[in-house]
Image (cartoon, grey):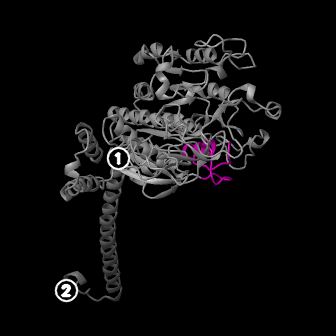
Amino acid sequence: MYLLLYQVLLFISIVSGKRDIEAEKKPSFWKDNAKKELEAALDAQRLNTNVAKNVIIFLGDGMGISTVTAGRILKGQLRGESGEETKLTMETLPHAALSKTYSANAQVSDSAATATAFLCGVKSNWYTLGVNAATVYDNCESTKGNGVESVLVDSYKAGKSAGVVTTTRIQHATPGATYAHAPNREWYGDADLTEEAKQNGCKDIALQFYEASDMITVALGGGRKYMQPENTTDYEYPKMSNSRKDGKDLIQMWKNKMTSSGFEPKFVWNKKEFDDVDVESTDRLLGLFEPSDMHYDAERSKDGEGEPSIAEMTSKAIQMLQKNDKGYFLLVEGGRIDHGHHSGNAYLSLHDVVAFDNAIAEALRMTSQEDTMIIVTADHSHVFTIGGKSIRGNNIFGLQPDVSNPVNALDNKPYTTLIYANGPGFHGEYFVNAMGYNEPIIKNGSSREDLTNVNTTAPDYLQQSAIPLDSETHGGEDVAIFASGPMAHLFHGVHEQSYIAYVMRYASCVGPDQGHCMKEDDIGRIEYLGSSISVSTANSTLRIQFIFLIILSVVIFILLLLLIRNSLNSKRKANYKESGKAPDVPLSTRP
């Protein structure tokens, strides 16, 4: 009910269009607005303690709070609104908290260690994936016996279906944490393994995906080149070779494996094939739409063969997974939010936030809050800020305080609302280095670029940064958790990031903690005298037994008294008979 009320408020804000400037001048506007929010907040106090049949976790990679705010404004401005008053779909979820993102050995963490935390429930070391903190980075030998299992694995063991959706490659840090164990997150394919790794028997992440694919009903993202031999070329780009050195075609091996297991598999690599998938007749679905990461959403239309949006992939995944009556676990990652920030390009990053939010809306439309827990969070933040003195409704990518009338800083040059603390946009000039990063050009004695005649709203513009780096860095502050559905109220304050995994397990009754399952809805049952009965039935039976025992004890006590009395009377009669005297009147007949 509470989520429905929030969704109604969101719908009203959408259809109302641009803000009513005159109405906002009246105190009654804000009073009425607060009253609606208060009603929704009070309704949210009706806690949903159901068991989560399904769990969907949406992970906005690098989606810190400043990114959420800027994404909110952009989404509103794309609808013709000023933007500040807009609500993202994720912000309509009734429960919210903060997550502490540090890792076992890093104040500011990376996506592998953070994914291990929120998917496996264990904080690990920087750049390590699906292992505990005893594992040393890039050291294969140290991983032995130190792997940790994810909520996806626990869900599969409980009979549920599982899926992974990402806009990066499926071997990347976040999706990889659901099934892989590696001391180096960048061991995407066997070509990336070190000699030490090969000698000690470590496997690349793509191979681990194949080996774990029995557990995964649907996987959608990028990463084709890590799955096929280097002597073959890509489906879409015939001049690009694949990268496996062991000669294995993991895609064909996946098809064979699924078929031999009795499943009807489907592999797709472009939009048309994706759209043509018949969900009812397909048991397993693998979609790899790019050799590496998928396109940014703002550039998706440039793909000649076409790519599905993250919302479309989410919809297809849910359709595949909901065929299992026992429920499912689904990870959906908006992974290129992070990549846009690393490139110093807020335009690409924030448009991916909007696309990511659309996927959340699609999931809410397709599921019920009564049996589906939905979590939206981030693995870490970025050194990305919203500042200046911008007026209401100013273009989020524009100069401040007003695009049409910018105000200069002390160096007599204008600046934008959005700025990075570090990154490639240092002086405004950069080149693409051998690693594919935007490396800033540093000139001795050069000063900040004059933005007077620069189009800062262009898709390829890089926001200025205070420190020159070829890749902007993560931020170390806490990130938001938004949640709805069964047990979502367990997100309520400031939590360790590893806590998220335990809430998902507890809410959905997978893994070792089954306490939430012991209730009358027959999810938790007790074996009693050879029969399986619900807890409430067992309680009623025990109460009846207790009452029966009390009654039985009273009856036995009365019978004992009668036996004692009769025994005493018999002894008196015997004594009188021996003495020749007449017996007295029995005790029970005396007046």
- For this orientation, the residue located farthest to the front is 412
Q: Is residue 437 visible in the rendered structure shown here? A: no
Instruction: Give the residue number, with chain letter if any, for mark 1.
Output: 84
Q: Could you tell me the amino acid type at mark 1?
A: Glu
Q: Residues within 10 Å of mark 1 (few under 14, many from 20)?
A: many
- In this view of the protein, which residue sits in the foreground, 534 or 473? 473
Q: Is residue 110 magenta?
A: yes
Quadrant of the rendering where the C terminus is positioned: bottom left
Pointers 1 and 2 in contact (C-beta within 8 Å): no
Question: Which range of residues does the magenta coloring cover?
Answer: 102-127
Instruction: Give the residue number, with chain letter if any, for mark 2.
Output: 590
- For this orientation, the residue located farthest to the left is 591
Percent x, y of residue 5: 25, 45
Percent x, y of residue 394: 37, 44
- In this view of the protein, which residue sits in the foreground, 136 or 544? 136
Residue 335 circle label? none
- State the residue at coordinates (30%, 53%): 44
